[in-house]
Image (spheres, helix red, strand yellow):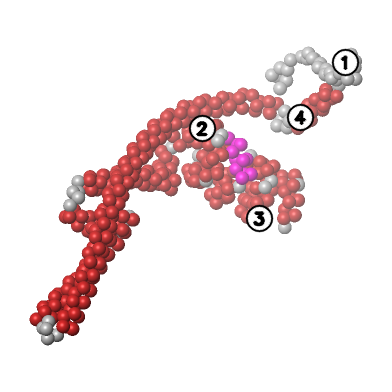
Amino acid sequence: NKDLMGKMLSDEKVLGMIMGDTELVGKMLGNEKVQKQIFGNSELMGKILSDEKVIGMIMSDKKLVGSMLKNEKVQSLILSDTDLLDGLFSDEKVMAKVLSNEDIMAKLMSNKTLKAAIMKKISSDKDLQKEIMGSDLMMQHTQAIASYSMLVGASKAVVSTLSKLNAELENVPLNQESLDKVNAAIEGAKQISEGNKDLADGLGQLYAGTQKLDEGLGTLSTGASQLHDGTSQLVANNGKLNDGAKQLSDGAGQLSDGASQLNDGAGKLSSGAGNLKSGADQLNSGANDLDNGAGELMNGAKDLNEGAGKLNDGIIELDDGVVELLDGVCKLDEEGIKKLYEAFDGDLTDFADKLSAIKEAGGNYTSFAGANADEKCSVKFIIKTEGIKSSDI
């Protein structure tokens, strides 16, 4: 019953009874629904976190500690209590939970005092250092560094291979044997550029023209044979002679067409070879750019490494300064704030109310000797009293 629980948790007498029973507090915190209402009540959580017995019970329940660390309101209360944080940091398992929670770590590291406390704890605890080095986060950083090294190595290998290929292409002589080698390379590379495609088309047309030329030669041979036979029988069979002459003419035409197609194919072959050389030049230029980029990447990595070293030195100096500041704050708390708090028996409410009333009255009282209505004035009284001795306190 949310309404009933809300009323109970807002009643000071009921809260007093609950806080007097550590076992009851433990049962309430163990219930998820009640737990949410308690975590949402900052005043109640403040009382719970100030009770040593309850804190001891909470520290023994790792699941409850994990739930508290995930709640933003409880996080704020814990981060504002240095003594409570010291208690949490003294427990290795709790410290491991804190280090694995990115949200909590971001808030802790944004606070100089808390950051100093964490760094001090880590630097003094070798077991905790081993646990951190074996964490998933450190493994991810290690894998990232390994992947980067592999990438740099692969880049160097690619640059070396492309440079060798370019040198070999530049040394190829432009004769029939080299063109045959280029043709074989084109077939093996499966037409890696538009020039290769044109070359393949030209070879196809050349092959087709060769076939037609072969057919024409066959026809020519047949026609010549018929011409010979027709000449022998010129007188007896003039008609056959005419037929042979006609077939000879047709074969000669086909031969001419085949020769023309052969010439076109040779031209396209030459053009394809030129395109291949142009593509090789572009490939070489790209390889040089890749080599330069890899060098710049290595220089950037070196600068990053040097910057990381300087950052580490700065963090160490910052840690030393924060520790000194923390000691000063603790001294101020012990020698000043706590004594003032004890002087009023721990209850400053009445004192604060009186100060507020005096301040309000002083704000309304603007003139002692009189002033014009359009003038803005203020009055201050200085009263000398007897000193307060330590025996009176």
Q: Which residue is mark 4?
A: 352
Residue 81 part of the magenta-drawn span: yes
Q: Position of residue 30 (x, y in %)?
A: 61, 53
Amino acid under label 2?
Answer: Ala
The answer for how far apart the CA atoms under marks 2 and 4 are is 34 Å
Q: Which residue is mark 1?
A: 368
Q: Which residues are magenta?
A: 72-82
The answer for how far apart the CA atoms under marks 2 and 1 are is 53 Å
The answer for how far apart the CA atoms under marks 2 and 3 are is 36 Å
The answer for how far apart the CA atoms under marks 4 and 3 are is 37 Å
Residue 33: mark in rendering: 3
Residue displayed at 64% across by 24% down:
336
Question: Are circles 2 and 3 on residues that touch, CB within 8 Å?
Answer: no
Of tags 2 and 3, the one toward the viewer is 2
Mark nearer the N terminus (2 vs 4)? 2
The answer for how far apart the CA atoms under marks 1 and 4 are is 26 Å
| SS type, badge 3 | helix
Mark nearer the N terminus (4 vs 3)? 3
Residue displayed at 76% across by 51% down:
7
Amino acid under label 3?
Answer: Lys
Residue 116: mark in rendering: 2
- The picture quadrant where one finds residue 362 is top right
Is residue 386 something that shows in the picture?
yes
The furthest residue to the left: 232
Would residue 272 be found to the left or right of residue 26 on screen?
Answer: left
Q: Position of residue 385 (x, y in %)?
A: 78, 14
Amino acid under label 1?
Answer: Phe
Amino acid under label 4?
Answer: Ala
